[in-house]
Amino acid sequence: MLYPLSIIIAAAAVVQTTAKAVDRVNSGVAAPQAIWWQIGEVGETCDATCRRVRQQPCVEGNWPQSYQDFENILRVTGVQCQQVEPGGWTQNPQKDGWTCNWEGDGRNGDRCALQSSEGQQRFCPCANNPAPPPPSPPAPQPGIKWRLGGQQETCAETCQRLESSQCVEEHWPNSYQAFLAVESETRASCNSVQPGGWDENPRQDANGICYWEGTDGNQARCQYNSNNGNRFCPCSSASPTPPSPSVTWVQGEQDQSCIMACAASNMRCSEATWPRSMQEFQNIANKFSLQCGSIEPGMGYSYPANPERGGSGVCYWQGEGTGERCNLEPEPQHVRFCPCTK
């Protein structure tokens, strides 16, 4: 069957226009400028997001025109939505919890300067031009080596396996720039970098997307594992210190503090000599014949009175900090291991 030439030309124009609209998001190019899609923080404008994350401007005229366009944005950003709806608000596309809205109010431009709706995060088209030389990353943290862990491995396990040391809390990156220093030190290659907001961050997922921000500034993250990817871990770079010859480790009684345990042997408890790694505690246990069926970091991640031994024979070595433990009593049914000096 033959169609009039005018119909064929019109159909070709529709196909070409649709292909260009989809290709703009798929390839990240809104001719002639390349685009990097980035999700912003709650209450942030896209101008601010692009300056903060990419040091580039937000580029108008690249907003999704269809559900399929927005699906491609979700794919390249690694963001997950349980529900996707059109919406129809000028600030779209944006995300409210697990619901995402993609359709604006009909305008394809003039959205970059708009703040997100209350409690929402905007998806932002940032210029992806060759970036100017980035600012120098923060200087490496003294005493810390960043290591990329194995799949489903906790940072405590990673640091013990790779460095024979312990994971050090309170060194987690608190900004995008701080994470860039971590990425550089570990020689990881992130396809993109997103805030995230999960306890196991910083981590790299199976798709190569890296997430740096934890949950509400949570600093106790060493014992979390990553169910989908690999964690970035701050490991102590200090060499394990062998027990000082002047320190004798003794086992206390149930409900007995180390002050009391050391006093029973006419000695005093020595602060600041607590083990900093599993290997260091193993050295102490071997030298002073401390009886342990097995060795674990701690109960509920760590407990101030460690090192101590439970009723099942398991020894827990990881406490909180390096001092002020001598006067603490052990957990019920536990006994403490105590550093005593003459």
Image (spheres, rainbow, N blue to C red):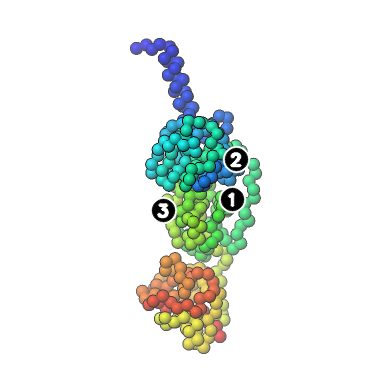
Instruction: Give coordinates of residue 104: x percent, y percent.
Output: 47, 34
Q: Amino acid at mark 1?
A: Gln
Q: Amino acid at mark 3?
A: Asn
Q: Amino acid at mark 2?
A: Gln
Nearer the observer, disc 1 or disc 3? 1
Quarter of the picture containing the N terminus is top left
Q: Residues within 10 Å of mark 2 (few under 14, many from 20)?
A: many
Mark 2 secondary-structure assignment = loop
Residue labelled with disc 1:
177
Q: Earlier in the sequence, mark 1 or mark 2?
A: 2
Mark 3 secondary-structure assignment = loop
Q: Would you place residue 178 above or below residue 316 in this image?
A: above
Between residue 172 and residue 157, name the one nearer to us.
172
Residue labelled with disc 2:
56
Instruction: Give coordinates of residue 118: x percent, y percent.
Output: 48, 45
Q: Residues within 10 Å of mark 3 (few under 14, many from 20)?
A: some
Residue labelled with disc 3:
227
Q: CA distance from mark 2 to mark 3?
A: 33 Å
Quarter of the picture containing the C terminus is bottom right
Q: Residues within 10 Å of mark 1 (few under 14, many from 20)?
A: some
Q: Are marks 2 and 3 in contact (CB under 8 Å)?
A: no
Between residue 299 and residue 55, name the one nearer to us.
55
Residue drawn at point x = 48 percent, y = 87 percent: 264
Q: Are marks 1 and 2 in contact (CB under 8 Å)?
A: no
Between residue 337 and residue 323, name the one nearer to us.
323
- Taking 303 as reference, is 145 left or right? right
Mark 1 secondary-structure assignment = helix
Residue drawn at point x = 51 percent, y = 65 percent: 166
Instruction: Give coordinates of residue 57: x percent, y percent.
Output: 59, 39
Q: Are marks 1 and 3 in contact (CB under 8 Å)?
A: no
